[in-house]
Image (tube, rainbow, N blue to C red):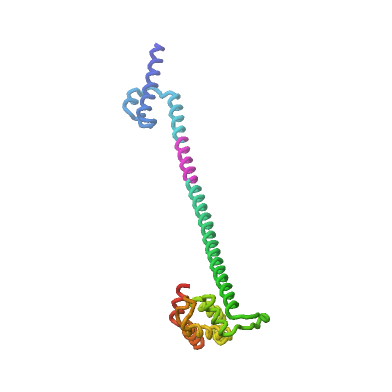
Amino acid sequence: MNDIKGLKCVAVVCAILLAQLLFKGSDAFLRHPLFVRIGSFRVPPLFDTLHNDKYKKNKQTKNNNNDSEESTMQSSSSSALSQAQLLQAQLQALRQEIQQDVQNLQQHKEALLQKKRDKVDQWIDTLLVATHVNGDTQMLHSVETVAQTLMDERFSPEQVNAIFERMTQDDPLQRVESPLVELLVDACNLVDCRDENPNKRWNERVEMKLRRKMFAMQWGIELEEEKERRLYD
């Protein structure tokens, strides 16, 4: 008889466990007809223990998943922040590099301009100045000597124009009346009037253009060719 009761208890426990598996841990199986039919038997404490353990395990798994998602979000946010900081640093480095390139380009342009000025100053000394008495006093060549140098050294109209601009760039109104400018223009007139000029680079009436520029400077007139030249400088 005891064996039969034991077998019944085992059967009830097995039925309860089977119902738990079928209903996936839900308490709904307690209201199932199967449970009602086997119902006069008391549920063993073992079932309660198994049910509570499974509930705790599911809750712990859910909490772990939430913690994992929160950790993933924090990691993604930290990664995005680091990427933004890296891009900002790269942008700052690029900006500094561009500024340095612009500065180098400006220095290069200034160096080229200074080199051109030095070269034109050398032309002025060679062409017009005979002797430097002191810092402010110069002995000039004669008009004939300057004209001969223009032909012998094969000065071009472009070179003469560069010399004229260099001598008048600081104070045009005062410089156009200086002895150096008058000497240059008079010498150009002599070369223009030559029937035979060995300097084949001298292919235009230079003196007339220089006189026109002098007149414009004295009266504050801006010539059209000067406007166009500044557009391309």
Which residue is depicted at the point 36% across and 32% down?
Answer: 28
Seen as rendered, the residue at the extreme right is 134
Which residue is depicted at the point 43% across and 23% down?
Answer: 44
Q: Say left or right for 182 vs 45.
A: right
Q: Where is residue 161 in the image (x, y as percent from the top left)?
A: 50, 78
Residue 62 position by quadrant = top left
Task: Work out whether residue 84 can be spotted.
Answer: yes
Seen as rendered, the residue at the extreme left is 33
Asked whether residue 23 is drawn in magenta, I would say no
Q: Where is residue 27 in the image (x, y as percent from the top left)?
A: 38, 31
Which image quadrant: the N terminus?
top left
Magenta-colored span: 60-75
Question: Residue 52 versus residue 88: which sits nearer the camera?
Answer: 88
Q: Where is residue 171 in the image (x, y as percent from the top left)?
A: 56, 83
Q: Give the mark count.
A: 0
Task: Work out whether residue 222 can be spotted.
Answer: no
- Above or below: residue 233 compared with residue 49: below
Question: Residue 125 versus residue 72: which sits nearer the camera?
Answer: 125
Question: Residue 89 versus residue 151: which sits nearer the camera?
Answer: 151
Magenta stretch prevailing secondary structure: helix
- Above or below: residue 161 compared with residue 110: below
Question: Residue 156 versus residue 213: which sits nearer the camera?
Answer: 156
Q: Where is residue 73 in the image (x, y as percent from the top left)?
A: 47, 45
